[in-house]
Amino acid sequence: MDRLVHRICVAKGHQQLVLFDSAATWAPNTLTFIEGDWAYCPAGERVAHEWLETQPRPYADLRDEVEERIRSTA
Ligand SMILES: [Zn+2]
């Protein structure tokens, strides 16, 4: 299932990868449904997003792209 993502979160505090703890009962949700379209936040935060409209592309592509960018600036 390839969901097209139309918005990406550019909030300064959210430009980090989700630290996934497999033992946790709750996992951060990096995709949010906004006004009928999917939006992606790398950190999976719930509030204080800063959405930027982007060229719609599949979630997997966008996620790889953002993770690559975050790693290269870390
Ligand atoms: Zn965010």
Image (cartoon, helix red, strand yellow):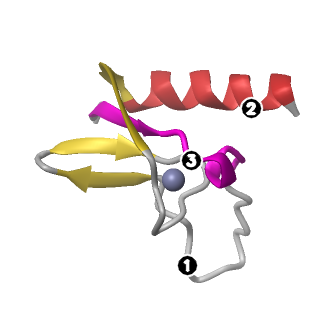
| Nearer-the-camera pick, 17 or 23 | 17
Amino acid type at image mark 1 = Trp
Q: Return the residue at label 2.
A: 70
Provide residue 47's location: percent of width, then percent of height. Answer: 46, 68
* Label 1 or label 2, whichever comes before in sequence order: 1
- Residue 32, picture quadrant: bottom left
**Dividing the image into 4 quarters, which one contains the C terminus?**
top right
Residue reaching furthest to the left: 36
Q: Which residue is mark 3?
A: 11
**For the point 13% across and 49% down, which residue is it?**
35
Distance in Å between CA atoms under marks 1 and 2: 23 Å
- Provide the residue span drawn in magenta: 4-17
Pointer 2 residue Cβ closer than 8 Å to ligand 1? no
Q: Report whether 37 appears left or right of 62.
A: left
Residue 48 position in % (x across, y down): 48, 63
Q: In the drawing, does residue 10 fall left or right of residue 19?
A: left
Q: x, y (%) of residue 69?
A: 71, 23
Tell me the crowding category of disc 2: few under 14, some 14 to 19, or many 20 or more residues within 10 angstroms, Cα based.
Answer: some
Q: Are marks 1 and 3 in contact (CB under 8 Å)?
A: no
The residue carrying mark 3 has its beta carbon less than 8 Å from ligand 1: yes
Residue 45 screen position, x and y as percent: 54, 64
| Residue at figure coordinates x 21%, y 52% from the top left | 34
Q: Please tell me in which quadrant of the rendered image residue 67 appears.
A: top right
Q: Nearer the viewer, mark 3 or mark 2?
A: 3
Residue at the extreme right: 74
What is the three-letter code of the residue carrying label 2?
Ile
Tag 3 secondary structure: loop
The residue that disc 1 covers is: 26
